[in-house]
């Protein structure tokens, strides 16, 4: 790994370390059920710091992007995974279908809703919209996997698709996991239906009326109908 790559990540680490907040770090760790350690940087501050960092240092070169993301992902504090996602969102136009395997590996590493809900709709959703031939190789397999974060990712990648939503695939995925006892899967089903209802309210009403959904999923789906 190059010295410039190390210095890029180290510079961001140095900036973040100047803005730690012990009490907010404790609160944040508790909020995410003690899954991760935190520096205690509030989201608006972290985003401002990362934006300024990118303005001054630029985005990683494409050939180094994967290594930068993995380095940040491996750091213990959760803010660094969020920084990785911020960088990915800024750099996503540079991504190609060859990047999807390593991108999808992030779904199952240090998994929780706060990373999945960026990775799936904002990164994977973007990738699939430009490479729909990859949906079969990835999302169709995720919904069949026993890992709940892969299931959630399959359900949510179309979150921002609106009129471009593949309704048949969406409903098929939902029915595949409609009986799940996992909170985060039930919640994802409700969320994607609620969002799709803004575009196709009658389709969602009909679907919910004609199929069994867990109470949480159904409640979330019909919240604004």
Image: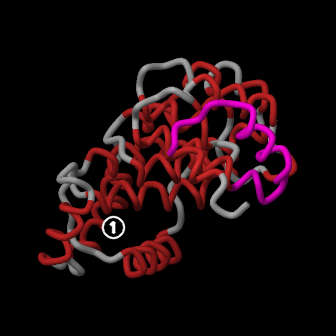
Name the image quarter holding the N terminus.
top left
Q: Pinpoint residue 179: horizontal percent, then vertical percent.
A: 51, 26
Vertical side of 5 occupied by 138: above or below: above
Q: Tell whether 16 sits left or right of 142.
A: left
Label 1 element class: helix
Q: Pinpoint residue 216: horizontal percent, then vertical percent.
A: 50, 46
**What residue is shown with label 1?**
12
Vertical side of 156 occupied by 136: above or below: above
Q: Does the magenta stretch include residue 210?
A: yes
Query: How many other residues sit within 10 Å of disc 1, few (<14), some (14-19) or many (≥20)?
Result: some
Q: Pinpoint residue 225: horizontal percent, then vertical percent.
A: 73, 60
Q: Which residue is at a point 36% across and 46% down the rendered structure image?
A: 112
Q: How many labels does the image show?
A: 1
Q: What span is in magenta?
A: 195-215
Q: Tell whether 80 sits left or right of 150.
A: left
Q: Which residue is at a point 83% across and 56% down the rendered structure image?
A: 199
Q: Is residue 209 magenta?
A: yes
Q: Which of 120 and 95 is in front in this view?
A: 120
Q: Tell whether 196 sits left or right of 220.
A: right
């Amino acid at each position: 790994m190059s010295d410039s790559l190390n210095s890029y990540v180290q510079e961001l680490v140095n900036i973040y370390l100047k803005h730690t907040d012990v009490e907010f770090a404790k609160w944040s760790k508790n909020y995410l059920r003690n899954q991760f350690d935190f520096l205690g940087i509030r989201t608006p501050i972290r985003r401002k710091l990362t934006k300024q960092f990118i303005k001054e240092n630029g985005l990683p070169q494409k050939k180094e992007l994967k290594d930068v993301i993995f380095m940040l992902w491996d750091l213990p504090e959760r803010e660094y995974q969020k920084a990785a996602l911020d960088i990915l969102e800024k750099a996503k136009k540079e991504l190609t279908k060859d990047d999807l395997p390593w991108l999808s590996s992030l779904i199952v590493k240090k998994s929780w809703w706060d990373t999945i809900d960026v990775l799936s709709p904002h990164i994977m959703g973007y990738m699939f919209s430009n490479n729909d031939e990859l949906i079969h190789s990835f999302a169709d397999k995720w919904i069949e996997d026993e890992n709940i974060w892969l299931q959630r990712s399959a359900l949510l990648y179309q979150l921002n698709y609106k009129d471009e939503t593949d309704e048949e695939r969406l409903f098929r995925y939902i029915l595949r996991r409609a009986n799940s006892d996992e909170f985060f899967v039930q919640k994802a089903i409700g969320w994607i239906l609620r969002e799709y209802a803004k575009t196709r309210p009658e389709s969602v009403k009909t679907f919910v009326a004609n199929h069994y959904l867990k109470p949480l999923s159904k409640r979330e789906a019909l919240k604004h109908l």
